[in-house]
Image (spheres, rainbow, N blue to C red):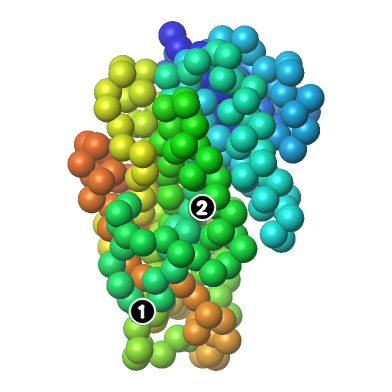
Amino acid sequence: MARILVVGAGDIGGHLAADLAQSGHQVYGVRRSDKAIADGVELVRADVADPESLLDLPTEIDVVVYSVASPVFSKEGYHTYYYKGLRNVLRAVRPMNPKRVVFVSSSSVYHQMDGEWVDETSETTPSSFAGKEMLAAEQALIKDKLPGTVVRLTGVYGPGRNRMIEQAKQGGHCDPEPPVWTNRIHRDDCVGVLKTLVEKALNDEPLEDIYLASDDEPATLFDVLEWMKDRIGDVEDDHDLPEATRRANRRCSNKRIKDLGYQLKYPDFRSGYDKQLADMGLV
């Protein structure tokens, strides 16, 4: 039984904590509220923005997973909860000498916008504040004395994440040319990738500094929306999505996570969204 600290026990972190607890580990979940996380997960109330609140962390930890979400979408919020928050946690856990710290990052660190393929070795010069703050946090971990691994998630979807489905129901349309490439990963596969990394860290297996977590099939926004509208059937008349031209437009390679041996539960958008649409009673 290992001792695992999940900092940020929200949707992804909370499900990861529950999964690890069910596997027999001693799991501590850090969140700002006093809401229980899951059976077998010990709640630790703390705010990563407040170093003093981290003084009550457990004194022995084998692996740390940092999976917080900024409560506000702003440069200040991202700087506080990703860059500064991660550094606060690193200082707090350094005396425990964990085997590895895993930071949940985002593909927003990439700047490519012309349909290029990107992977963990691609250049990262983001222009958005979100990408810049995420990249700064990544670098803080990689440069730290503790062993660290960054996981860059692409567009996360799954239960409760219905934005694309609502756009399709409302007749959202994007022209097929020029193609706008999108990438995604189901919430359950986010949890699966993170759990795989935790288990490998506990077994002292070598890990890369960075992993890009996405499904097997980048798809154009046109293809996703048209497939979804066909599946739902009863949708509103087509109207252009005004934000389509402002979306990220790149294709993300998941070769490195596949090389880990991880098998995706939802390898493409059809398999994942089909279940979600069925669960919502839309098909």
How many C-alpha atoms fall within 10 Å of the one at disc 1: few (<14), some, or many (≥20)? some
Q: Mark 1 is on which residue type?
A: Asp
Task: Please state if 215 lies on the left or on the right of 128 as rendered.
Answer: left
Whether the residues at callouts 1 and 2 have beta carbons within 8 Å, the answer is no
Image coordinates for residue 239, horizontal then vertical, percent? 55, 91
How many C-alpha atoms fall within 10 Å of the one at disc 2: few (<14), some, or many (≥20)? many
What residue is shown at x 47% (from left), y 21% (from top)? Answer: 63
Q: Earlier in the sequence, mark 1 or mark 2?
A: 1
> Can residue 27 be seen by looking at this rendering?
no
Q: Residue under circle 2? A: 135
Q: Which mark is residue 249?
A: none
The relative height of residue 240 versus residue 97 in the rendered view (above or below) is below
Q: Which mark is residue 114?
A: 1
Q: Quadrant of the N terminus?
A: top left
Instruction: Compute the Cα span from label 1 to label 2.
Output: 21 Å
What residue is shown at x 34% (from left), y 90% (from top)? Answer: 177
The relative height of residue 242 versus residue 51 in the rendered view (above or below) is below
Q: Secondary structure at mark 2?
A: helix
What residue is shown at x 41% (from left), y 90% (from top)? Answer: 175
Image coordinates for residue 248, horizontal then vertical, percent? 46, 72
> Can residue 103 be seen by looking at this rendering?
yes
What residue is shown at x 23% (from left), y 50% (from top)? Answer: 255
